[in-house]
Amino acid sequence: MENKIDCIEVDVLVVGAGLAGLKVTNELIENNVHTLLVTKTILASGSSFYPLKASLGTQVTRDTSDQSIFMQDIKTVNREVGHPELDLVYVQNIADRVKEYESIGVDATKLSGDRKACFAEHSRDIYLLKDWNQIRTNVKKLFTSNKYLQILENTSVMSIVKKDQRVVGAFLLDKDGKDIYVATKAIILASGGFGSIYKHNLNPNDVDGSGHILALEAGAELVNMEFIQFIPGITSPKYKTLFGEQTLAYCTDLVDEEQNSIIDEFLPDKDKKREMLNIRSSHGPFTSTFESKYFDIALMKKIIKHRNEKGYRLVFEKELYSNEEEFYTVYLNWLQDKGVNLIRDDVYIAPFAHASNGGVKIDSYGRTNVPGLYAIGELAATVEGANRLGGVSTGGCIVFGKRAAEDCQLYIKTVNQVNVHVDDELEKAGQKLLSLYIDKDNADLQKNDDWTQAQLNVHEIIEKVREIMWIHGNVVRTEKGLLHALQQIAVLKEQFLTNIKTMKFSENRKGMIRARNFLILSELLLTAMLERKESRGAHYRDDFPVENADYSKRLYISIERGRIACRFQNNK
């Protein structure tokens, strides 16, 4: 029978069109490698191009003498669960790589003045990436007329195909829901993080962890998934706007509707509120490492107690707008363009999911443990551990994007294209939707919530997962809350399997795949949070509030015998 599925043959398939995807793609096509770039939305997308702030930063090694100091800065914030080999690669290469931003259409301008990046103990060169609309225009000009490059927008990767333990292809769903099979020698995943699994997040909708599930099911491992960055975000007067932490140097309090401080109740010494706020002004994401933790803990505990998702109001000194440092003026002017003034307006904040410190386990060339499969950008666990040093996430995209391209070019010369029976493989991909890796320990539970009695559709399942994660997998975590969340996810898995058996495979496949990914991802995230019985960096357990040396290990996640498996292990 004639095969009705469109087929494409390329040397390399790149998934994701943010900074990491663009960098690796540019390196490949400049070396005449036939490449297919696939993105769920449009070219120049993902968190890199999401208009949260006026600029992003890249922290750069000053000179050779700074390398050891930079390494120590990274080690300090990683809290013993980072990857020293990858850290060293970053420190040794970033000064050269930052010069290559222009080749992918990015304007990188060195920040004036002497400034420490978020969590850094020492100051060094920071480059601002700004004018994202212009960058997107530049990218389109550079990438849409190269004979070695094909681009598919509004297209999702459904499944990776392997033969003899290595990558040989992938199934895609295009914008019209049509199947495409890509025969390829290698796949480079650069699809970003998973922030949109949280109800309130600072990510575009397509940053949904799909790459993590693709890698996991292909046989790769995940690591450090419990370390997720939560950053205060503005809920009002303009929802989902990134809050500039530097302004807390001029903040006097965080108050409820009756003007009562919500911080005082949780701060061990009220006389140190000013000191605590000053520390909090030096870093964007929450961390349990510093005394500034009480700011975020108070905020989240009050939100949970009162189910007040609007959050609480900031009180500022008027002198804020007299600070003429570029780091302040760029942000405050950007806010002003959005119609927000921190003095004039009542500004409310809440913790928003922002970025993942963990991800796919890779080596210094972006290689996973699956031949032919690479992971880069926020999808991968690179220069971060329990905390992420500011200004290394963007830099990591270009450092490891270049190295992955270099290694991939060597790899594809050693392998040939492999023919598969496309229809049979597509059927297997469809059957995979039924594989939810059910945890028997959570399957038998009391269905005592009203919503568990109703039959939810795919969209409702997705939204329920996002709500569960935001309440129980946020800044403040407890064993009771995590176990309850896992039980709720188990109920949703049952409902999903019931739904999918009554739906034709051709109906709303993207929604079905997204719901399935969220169910698997939420379980493994909650399980990782439950396994780490301590507080370390971005991971805070209210029932284990201190760092425990016994947990100075990385937590690896894999699929073993049809179940999600976790193990703690020292760096390897």
Image (cartoon, helix red, strand yellow):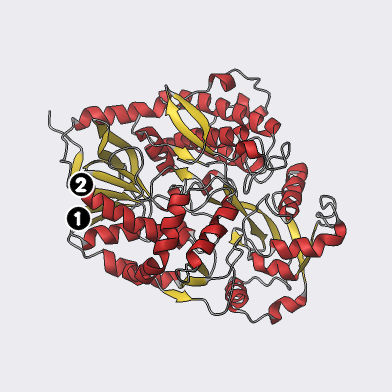
At which x and y percent is residue 400? Answer: 37, 55
Q: Amino acid at mark 2?
A: Ile
Residue located at (73% from left, 47% from top): 303
In the shown orientation, is residue 155 left or right of residue 468? left
Report which residue position mark 2 lands on. 412
Q: Quadrant of the C terminus?
A: top left
Instruction: Name the front one of labels 1 and 2.
Output: 2
Q: Amino acid at mark 1?
A: Val
At which x and y percent is residue 522? Answer: 54, 36
- Depth check: 310 or 451 in front? 310
> Dot 1, crowdedness within 10 Å: few (<14), some or many (≥20)?
many
Task: Identify the mark nearer the N-term, 1 or 2.
Answer: 1
Above or below, 440 relative to 461: above
User: Which disc number belongs to residue 319?
Assistant: none
Q: Quadrant of residue 108?
A: bottom left
> Dot 2, crowdedness within 10 Å: few (<14), some or many (≥20)?
some
- Depth check: 25 or 111 in front? 111
State if disc 2 and disc 1 touch (CB < 8 Å): yes
- Depth check: 526 or 508 in front? 526
Report which residue position mark 1 lands on. 33
In the shown orientation, is residue 269 left or right of residue 378? right
Residue located at (31% from left, 37% from top): 160
Residue furthest left in the image:
1
Q: Quadrant of residue 284?
A: bottom right
Q: Quadrant of residue 7?
A: top left
Residue located at (67% from left, 63% from top): 237
At which x and y percent is residue 232? Answer: 65, 57
- Depth check: 554 or 286 in front? 554
Secondary element at tag 1: loop
Secondary element at tag 2: helix
